[in-house]
Amino acid sequence: MSKGKKALIVAFGSRGDVAPTAGVGARLREAGYDVTLAADKAFATLVEDAGLGFHPLIGDARAAAASELHSDAVRDGMASRSGAKLLKAAKQFIRALNINVAGITADSGADIVLFNALGAAAYHVAQARGIPSVGLHLQPQQPTAELPPTTLGHSLGRLGNRLATGLIRLFERMYFADINDIRAEHDLPPTTPAATYRKQAAEQWPILHGISRHVVPRPRDWRPGLEIVGYWWPTMPSGWTPPEDLRRFLDAGPPPVFVGLGSTNPGNPEHLSGVVTAALRRAGQRGVIQAGWAELSTSDDDMLTIGDVPHEWLFPRMATVVHAAGAGTTAAGLRAGVPTVPVPVTRDGPFWSYRLTTLGVSPGAIRFKKLTIDSLADAVREAVTNPVYTRRATELATNIATEDGAGQVLTTVTNLT
């Protein structure tokens, strides 16, 4: 029986990280679990709208994305001096985050803990408390010969596999900051990332991936316990209705093109907004521009700037979607059955751009450094006018609709508790 049992979900990251796990939390709550979700303070309303308890994590993801250091690293690349400075700052933050997550987990009284990659300190505290835990991932991060080494490895693939692998190991060590101090506080012996992975493999510790198997088939060389279970869909905000200006705009003409960069902030919003506006007009398309953290803004008879609008409502009404190819927005576009033009900026964007192109729902990605009026106009025109992309997107959406990713998580949690 799940009634009265407590579940803690740790979801550090942007909206694309938090919203799907809130959908998982809502399914657990419906089954009788008392669910608390720990996330960035900016997402308190999102979490509470899903009927979950909320616990803030340290930091401010939006402020970090808007920082000069982050913008410089996006502009210059992670292999630059700016990128090195950003990695140093990230290492210091992850050290503090690990301590924060460990404290939340220890004080939660949870009967089970679920967490994404940056909440991994919860694993060690759960081990000390003798309670089960589950990894919740939104992209493949485990080694396999069937995909790029990780999303990071795909992003850095042009630097060479050996260097990419070395940087992956650097990130793994960075995520492990202060873990042995945390383990000592809970009377656990010291360990290493490699020893932790071996233990998890031996125990078939579950890592569930909120991805459709039609989008990323489960690699055949993965160990038992690593599963592709289907997408986790965000809950609709309670009482939400579309803004009247958006309804009028959609009714006034053919389906427009969506453009939004979500929780990325590459800087220089005026220039970027101008490129987007000019490109859509050159492609002969109306546009719905989501401001997002990039602070895009444009307005005219053929363009409308919007704030947060649930993608599950908006995207089916678009001709195509242009976005930064984060995991959550990629999933929403595939669910809607519309073609995509990915513009990867940071993090997992290159991997999902690769998948969207491979799946045949996109004419190809535009690297952010190569984003121009011409490149965006050409890609949008191809995505909108070539029926091959729409047909493949429709087929994928039909297949994805048969899956119940959150239900698969519930089954695992129920079996463990």
Image (spheres, rainbow, N blue to C red):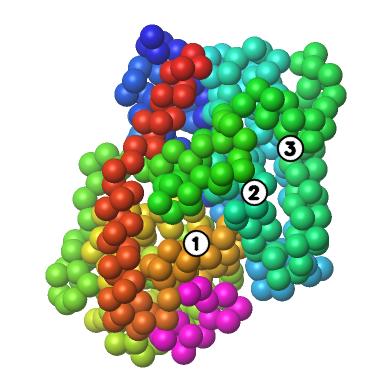
**In this view, which residue lies farthest toward the front?**
220
What's under tag 1, amino acid-wise? Arg
| Residue 407 among magenta residues | no
Q: Check contact, mark 3 vs mark 2: CB within 8 A.
A: no
Find disc 2 in the rendering and name its residue: 144
Q: How crowded is mark 2: few (under 14 residues within 10 Å), some or many (20 or more)?
A: some
In the rendered view, would you say 247 is above or below 45?
below
| Residue 370 among magenta residues | yes
Q: How crowded is mark 1: few (under 14 residues within 10 Å), some or many (20 or more)?
A: some
Find disc 3 in the rendering and name its residue: 96
Residue appearing at x 62%, y 23% in the figure: 105
Task: Give the spatial CA distance, label 3 vs label 2.
Answer: 31 Å
Instruction: State the image quarter where residue 67 is shown.
Output: bottom right
Magenta stretch bounds: 364-378
| Percent position of residue 10, x then y | 56, 33
Residue appearing at x 79%, y 30% in the figure: 195
Q: Which of marks 3 and 2 is in front?
A: 2
Q: Which mark is residue 355?
A: 1
What's under tag 2, amino acid-wise? Thr
Q: Main secondary structure of the magenta part?
A: helix
Q: What element carries label 3?
A: helix
Q: What element carries label 2?
A: loop
Q: Which of 165 and 48 is in front in this view?
A: 165
Q: Is residue 99 visible?
A: no
Earlier in the chain: of badge 3 and badge 2, it is 3
- Residue 98 placement, left or right of 387: right
Q: Which of 69 and 5 is in front in this view?
A: 5
Residue appearing at x 68%, y 18% in the figure: 127
Q: Which of 3 and 225 is in front in this view?
A: 225
